[in-house]
Amino acid sequence: MVLGRHLFFTINLLQRRNNDLLTRYIQSLRTVVQNVRSRHPFVIHGWVVLPDHIHCVIELPQGDSDFALRLRLIKSNFSKCTPKTERISASREARGERGIWQRRYWEHLIRDEADFATHMNYVHINPVKHGLVKTVKDWPYSTFHHLVKQGVYPENWAGGLQPDIDYDEK
């Protein structure tokens, strides 16, 4: 692992309560991420889409630290794919913004292998943490299934028991 190129993010919808926008438009989100990755490459190590927020662990290419561009493009292009049904504040309207995403996001630079493992586990346990499913393998919008096929996680990882990780919301 090359330090300084791996990052963890949490990206939240503006209105999180009873909002399933991300899972309702999951195919649009997948297409947007794929298009952004084709123009501005990055490796997805871990990714989970919940109804109202996303957690991910990504790796940027050598010599490229512009994660903000990638996140901005994902958020703005996804916004263009969804119907305008949200309430838009006067300040957002003045800026020409939609009322879909929180303006900011949580970012964390991965420090070492242990930090990487902790954040990968956090990404994948999150649907269980939020009570969306009983086991990690039951959540369809996650890289967990791909990582099981690669042998990174066993299919029954955390099988009803949450691993010993920090559950404070990131």
Image: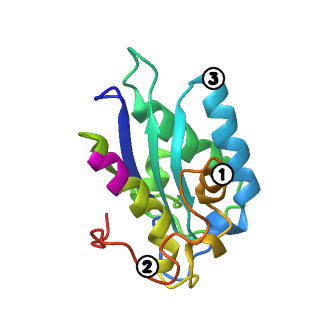
Q: Which mark is residue 129?
A: 2
Residue 136 in the image: x percent, y percent? 56, 72
Residue range (magenta): 114-118
- Badge 1: few (under 14), some or many (20 or more) residues near its Cα, within 10 Å? few
The magenta stretch spans residue 18: no
User: Tag 1: residue type?
Assistant: His
Q: Main secondary structure of the magenta part?
A: helix
Specify the quadrant of the image occupied by residue 34.
Answer: top right
Q: Earlier in the sequence, mark 1 or mark 3?
A: 3
- Image quarter where the N terminus lies is top left
Residue 70 in the image: x percent, y percent? 50, 34
Q: Residue furthest top?
A: 63
Q: How many marks?
A: 3
Q: Secondary structure at mark 1?
A: helix
Question: In the figure, is residue 129 to the left or right of 138?
Answer: left
Q: Residue at x 54, y 47 (%)?
A: 75
Of circles 1 and 3, which is in front? 1
Q: Earlier in the sequence, mark 1 or mark 2?
A: 2
User: Tag 2: residue type?
Assistant: Lys
Task: Name the residue tied to disc 3.
Answer: 39
Work out whether residue 119 or residue 85 is closer to the camera in this orientation and state it.
119
What's the distance in space between the residues labelled 1 and 2, CA to CA? 20 Å
| Vertical comparison of 135 with 148: above or below | below
Task: Name the residue tied to disc 1.
Answer: 146
What's the distance in space between the residues labelled 2 and 3, CA to CA? 34 Å
What's the distance in space between the residues labelled 1 and 3, CA to CA? 23 Å
For the residues bearing labels 2 and 3, Cβ distance under 8 angstroms: no
